[in-house]
Amino acid sequence: MEIITWVERRRRWRLEEKLRIVAEVERLGASFAAVARRHEVSRGLLWNWRQQVRRGTLIPEPMAMFTPVQITSDLSSLDCPTPARRDPAAGRPPASEVSRIEITLPDGTCIRVGADVGLPALRRVMAAVRR
């Protein structure tokens, strides 16, 4: 008779651990069952992780990068070419141009977004530019 004195809980796997274990399975000559046993993970779960990696749904997060930022109040001091002003009679740019963010990448690509653009949208734009 076996007496269980603890409650077995689901294990939480970090993304890095999953990718490391899947990479171990993919090595030449690796035994699928041995890798699963060594890491105490079911073969079915390991199979799912492997399929997710192959489909591209289980991918590592991109590395964070720091980029120098220059904050200016004068739009003419930027290297990024400014668009034609919509209100030529006024001496200053319209409020929509003042409240925008301009990002100039090292390759010369210039991205202009409104200050009200959310972080998820900006991430999608930056990911598209990097491709």
Image (cartoon, rainbow, N blue to C red):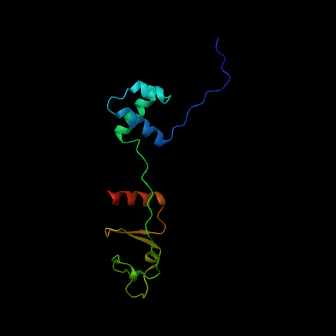
* Residue at the front extreme of this rendering: 29
Is residue 114 positioned above or below 129 on the image? below
Please name whichever residue, 115 or 77, is drawn nearer the observer in this view of the structure: 77
Q: As rendered, which of 8 and 110 lies closer to the eye?
A: 8
Left or right: 108 as drawn, with respect to 90: left
**Residue 46 image-quadrant placement:** top left
Residue 18's x, y, as percent? Answer: 45, 38
Position of residue 37 measured from the top left corner of the image (x, y, whole percent): 47, 25
Residue 90's x, y, as percent?
A: 42, 87
* 12 is higher (above) or lower (below) than 61: above
**Relative horizontal placement of residue 111, taking residue 39 as reference (left or right):** left
Furthest residue to the top?
A: 1
Residue under the point 66% across and 25% down: 6
* Residue at left offset 47%, top offset 76%: 71
Q: Quadrant of the C terminus?
A: bottom left
- Residue at image position (35%, 57%) is 128
State whether residue 99 is above or below residue 131.
below
